Image (cartoon, rainbow, N blue to C red):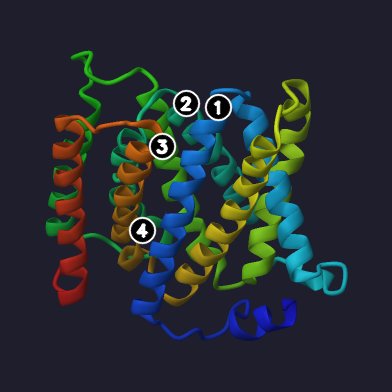
Amino acid sequence: MAQDNQKHFPAGGHVPVVPLVGISLIVLACLCFAVLDAIAKYLSASLPTLQIVWIRFLSHTVIAIVLFRVWKTPSLLKTGRPVLQLVRAACLLSTTILNFLAVRYLQLAETMSIMFATPFVITALAGPLLGEWAGIRRWCAIIVGFIGVLVVTQPGVGGMHWAAIYSVAAMCTYALYALFTRQLTATDGSAGMLIISGLVATVAMTPVGLSVWETPQDILTWGLLLATGALGAGGHFVFIMAHRIAPAPVLAPFIYSQIVWMIALGYLVFADVPTLSTLLGAAIVVGSGLYILYRERVKGI
């Protein structure tokens, strides 16, 4: 399977741009991430957040190593840009910690609405990092999207829990993770990127995870803990594949598909009903993001 991965998703070289396939993969990744967040929120009621983060990356790494049989093809871990790999892994770890802390206190729909600002951060940074500079229309859309985030978070009016700052920080690190992923697909293989990010996070979190360890009390809890790794590994692998075959600005707006899953899971699992300000702010952000997608399609921005 590792050889198949190199065949279909080689490191470097020419990779055909297939927007519709990339979009389908990013939507699938968002479904995995939504279920992962729901499980993390459920587990946080009985286990320390940092323990959940540690097991999420530990199981992610073990699953990826077994899946790609790294012991047979250690060359999978070869990277031409080790520093960027480490920075990317740090961004993913930071995003996970911050997001798991956020869902401990906030509704899933609230955290996702704030994360919806990710496409705007990606658009703003795509110029200096990827050479894809934004025009005046796209910047107007970015400003409108930021207004939508303000409607959700309601800074200074006491409408949003203080933990919203975790979601804002997670949004920024996630945007950097997406951009660095796009950069690395030009030189590094998908399997290696998946394993390295999990391995770096596992090593970094092991001392912390052990220090706060609380033994799960039942099989369900153990199963859900291990499921976080499977969902994380699977979600991020298709996320990497999506960025290998389609540009980051094309994929970014489809992060919005996650709100459907977040609202549904929040209601079904936690009986969370999103507030009017959350729905209104999310609608503003989604609308501005879809405008970015429209301008991307007509190539006129």
Q: Secondary structure at mark 4?
A: helix
Disc 2: which residue: 104
- CA separation in Å, label 4 and label 3: 37 Å
In the image: residue 161, left or right of residue 169:
left
Q: Amino acid at mark 1?
A: Ser
- CA separation in Å, label 2 and label 4: 31 Å
Tell me, yes or no, whether the two marked residues, 1 and 2, touch with CB atoms within 8 Å.
yes
In the image: residue 68, left or right of residue 85:
right
Any mark on residue 269, and which? 3
Q: Secondary structure at mark 3?
A: helix
| Label 2 or label 3, whichever comes before in sequence order | 2
Quarter of the rendering occupied by the N terminus: bottom right
The local crowd at label 1, few if under 14, some if 14 to 19, many if 20 or more residues have their Cα within 10 Å, is: some
Name the front one of labels 1 and 3: 3
Disc 1: which residue: 44
Q: Amino acid at mark 3?
A: Val
Disc 4: which residue: 126
The local crowd at label 2, few if under 14, some if 14 to 19, many if 20 or more residues have their Cα within 10 Å, is: some
Tell me, yes or no, whether the two marked residues, 4 and 1, touch with CB atoms within 8 Å.
no
Q: Amino acid at mark 4?
A: Ala
Q: Residue at x 39, y 32 (%)?
A: 270
Name the front one of labels 2 and 4: 2
- CA separation in Å, label 1 and label 3: 14 Å
| Whether residue 135 can be seen here | no
Q: Amino acid at mark 2?
A: Arg
Q: Residue at x 32, y 64 (%)?
A: 249
| Label 4 or label 1, whichever comes before in sequence order | 1
Image x and y of residue 68, in percent: 75, 70
Look at the picture and state if 231 lies above or below 56.
Answer: below
| Label 2 or label 4, whichever comes before in sequence order | 2
Q: Secondary structure at mark 1?
A: loop
- CA separation in Å, label 4 and label 1: 35 Å
